[in-house]
Amino acid sequence: MNSDDRSKPPRQTSGPSIPIEGPQTPQPFNRGTFPGRDASDAGRKPEPNPHAQAFRSPYGQGQSGDQADPRSSFSPMISLPTGGGALRSIGEKFSPNPFTGTGSTSVPITTSPGRGGFGPTLALSYGSGQGNGPWGLGWMLGVPAISRKTDKGLPEYRDGHPDPKQQDTFVLAGVEDLVPVLDGQGKVWSQVRDGHVVHRFRPRVEGGFSRIERWRSQATGEVFWKTLSPGNITSYFGKTAGARIADPLDARRVFSWLLEESHDDRGNIIVYEYKQEDLAGVDTNAPEERPRLAKTTVQAQRYLKRIKYGNSTPFEKGGWLFEVVLDYGEHGTWHDDQLEISPAEDRAWLVRQDTFSNFRAGFEVRVRRLCRRVLMFHHFSAELGQTDYLVASTDLVHDEDPALTRVVGVTQRGYRLDTQSGYYEVAALPTLEFEYSDSALDPTLHEITDAETLNNLPGGIDGRMNRLVDLDGEGVPGVVVEQAGTWYYKRGLGDGRFGPMVALPTRPTTLGAPGVQLMDVDGDGRKELVSFVAPTPGSSRGPRARGGRTFAGSPRSRTSTGRIRGCS
């Protein structure tokens, strides 16, 4: 990124850096006496240094560029000037992942350091494999949370079950699974403190060496999390209901505990505040909204709204000197080139065009808002002459669309208050721009007219008795057809065409039976027919392989619930 700041000239240098040969004895500077300039030293030849040979510099005799020793093979060192006109970026970083083929980048958000450097370090991170969120497709803010793991199924919310294996797995910051700590007898460690039952957890792969505790109230059953880092920083997750993503119909079913507070051993405190979805500006009579709001209008979604830190009195909340405000469209009014803005909301937040929902929690978590910018306020009324003083912001430029919203630019701005108008003057760094590759998929709906493809498929492909499966591992799916107790296969030819129907060898069970799935259990790219239910749990290889095998301790997954699906 180019910086166009010309407020101060570059620092000038007097010439190249000259190495000193041999140890030098410091000489006192008398008033009005300057070595090399004083009249008494004029014309005086310097005395030879007896240590010069032992400490001779490899860079020659130390002359300037036009006086360098011609016998030296080293060039004199040059000190380049630096200053406000130097080229620099806003700190973005990009890194590819050759294993998955995805790419990631991060953009820092401007925040002021707190006392002793204790303050939030925020950055927007993009991953080409990430989903949509309050920032745009693929973007997320690095504020940690503790959530239930959903990679292997929907959460059961059986936290009180005596067997830890029957409970949900928790994930810290979406990185590592948490496992309960055991005592000397091999039982789950627990302790009663301050009216709470405390259980300790550790990451499955230890790396941070933090103490992680889950606190459950004996009176109300409410749960929050507490962590203690090796640097003696204590953090609380979901200590109040405002920092939890829970089922609107049952507040005890908490899916995610959001970071709510952090403090160090010197009394510095950081507080995170969240805003609950209130349906402001939402058309509740719209066809897509009316059915989901029929049961309850209480929404599970929480949006990070404020971060307060720099408390005036150690160990006491309040008197915040710094405040980060996330703007979802509620703040600021432009007056020509000047901005009128404050930490207080001026209007209702905006509804994004591409609203979407997530049901991984077992209930709906709908995202209706889009963060437009992050504001940095200072509260030094005596020094700045105003209680709320905006000093910087990180603005996002979105390409909004009803189907998908993408971040196309990030701009960092600085502000200075015009005391006459009461509005802020704005100066900005060049915008960091992003471009995305468009999808190569053809949205046109084509009609199959090939007679061979339509042969023996009078009812089309219903996904049950006629199923698209890449049975030979060729990368092109064919059609597996079950008729009169026999399996047939129509090989995929590409371009929506299928070959003639060929009978397959005898299969051990019915494709459409409960608990039967087609999946690749050994990772060789070929599908196996897997049965999860008695009396014959096991798998059978494809038609080109021989025999089958029985699982040792076969899985007893409840495939009929729809929570486990086979890969076709």
Image: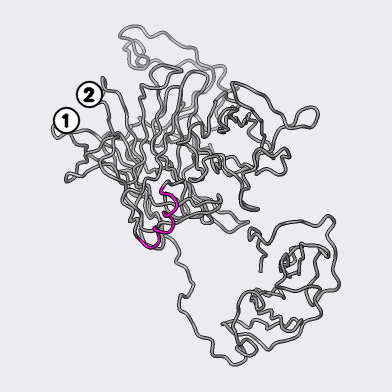
**Pointer 1 local density, CA inside 10 Å: few below 14, some 14–19, many at least 20:** few
Residue sitting at x 67%, y 77%: 465
- Residue 22 placement (x, y as % from top left): 54, 20
430 or 423: which is nearer to us? 423
Seen in the picture, residue 412 relative to 551 is either above or below; the reply is above
Q: Which residues are magenta?
A: 286-297
- Residue 335 placement (x, y as % from top left): 17, 44
Q: What secondary structure prevails in the magenta region?
A: loop
* Image side of residue 245 versus residue 545, left or right: left
- Residue 241 placement (x, y as % from top left): 48, 35
353 or 511: which is nearer to us? 511
Seen in the picture, residue 235 relative to 375 is either above or below; the reply is above
Dot 1 and dot 2 residues touching (CB under 8 Å): yes
Where residue 284 sits, quadrant-wise, is bottom left
Disc 2 residue type? Gly
Residue sitting at x 39%, y 58%: 290
Where residue 177 sits, quadrant-wise, is top right
Q: CA distance from mark 1 to mark 2?
A: 10 Å
* Residue 287 lies in the magenta stretch: yes
The C terminus, quarter of image: bottom right
* Image side of residue 105 versus residue 458, left or right: left
370 or 218: which is nearer to us? 218
Q: Which residue is mark 1?
A: 419
* Residue 152 lies in the magenta stretch: no
Where residue 552 sits, quadrant-wise, is bottom right
Q: What secondary structure is marked by label 2?
A: loop
Label ID, residue 385: 2
Residue sitting at x 57%, y 25%: 231
- Residue 538 placement (x, y as % from top left): 81, 64
Colour mode of the rendering: one colour
